[in-house]
Image (cartoon, rainbow, N blue to C red):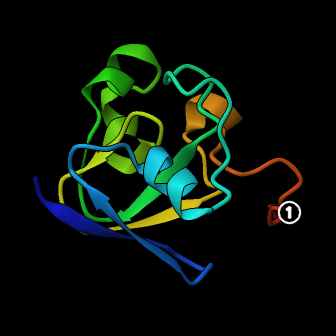
Amino acid sequence: MTDYTVEFVGTGEEITVSDTETILAACLDAGIAQEYSCRVGMCLACSAEIVEGEVNQRVAVARALTEEEAEEYALTCMARPASDLKLDRGTYPPSIEGDGRVEGEETAAADD
């Protein structure tokens, strides 16, 4: 068993997560308000962009993420750290938002 540091960018939150537990479980144990709903990798509510590091999340690819998305996003309910991580919560894969932005987030207008 190996422990890794998981840092959530922009929040100042950092936890230690074993490679045998999910990131979501460690968040809940530490009192971190990580968003989630189904806890089985189907709803994508617990998604976070992988800024740095690697995760193991084979089940997430089988259920909800494309291979490409799984390289850039972690489903924290399924993902187990494979290295120290930096994650950006509130950034979702294109398959959930269409463009990866959180609803209500302003976008730059194109000058046509």
Q: Which residue is mark 1?
A: 106
Residue occupying the far front of the picture: 29
Position of 9 with respect to 32 (left or right) is left
Q: Quadrant of the C terminus?
A: bottom right
Residue 41 in picture, x, y percent from top left: 49, 24
Left/right of residue 64 with respect to residue 45 in the rendered view: left
- 91 or 31, which lies in front? 31
The residue lying at 57 percent from left, 52 percent from top is: 28
Where residue 54 appears, as percent x and y from the top left, is: 23, 55
Density class for disc 1 (Cα within 10 Å; few <14, some 14-19, many ≥20) is: few
In the shown orientation, is residue 86 left or right of residue 102?
Answer: left
Q: Nearer the viewer, residue 10 or 12?
A: 12
Query: Would residue 14 appear left or right of 18 to someone viewing this image?
Result: right
Q: Residue at x 89, y 53 (%)?
A: 104
The amino acid type found where label 1 is placed reads Glu
The residue furthest left is 1
For residue 109, above or below residue 36 = below
**Of residues 7 and 63, which is closer to you in this image?**
7
The location of residue 23, given as percent across then percent down, is 41, 50
- Give percent across and percent down for residue 55: 26, 48
Residue lying furthest top in this view?
Answer: 62
Name the image quarter holding residue 110: bottom right
Compared to residue 10, the image places residue 31 above or below, namely above
How many numbered discs, if any? 1
Q: Residue at x 24, y 66 (%)?
A: 4
Which residue corresponds to the image point at 69% horizontal and 36% vertical from the top-left? 97
Say which element carries label 1.
Answer: loop
| Residue placed most toward the observer, 21 or 87 | 21
Quadrant housing residue 5: bottom left
Quadrant of res 52: bottom left
- Is 69 above or below relative to 53? above
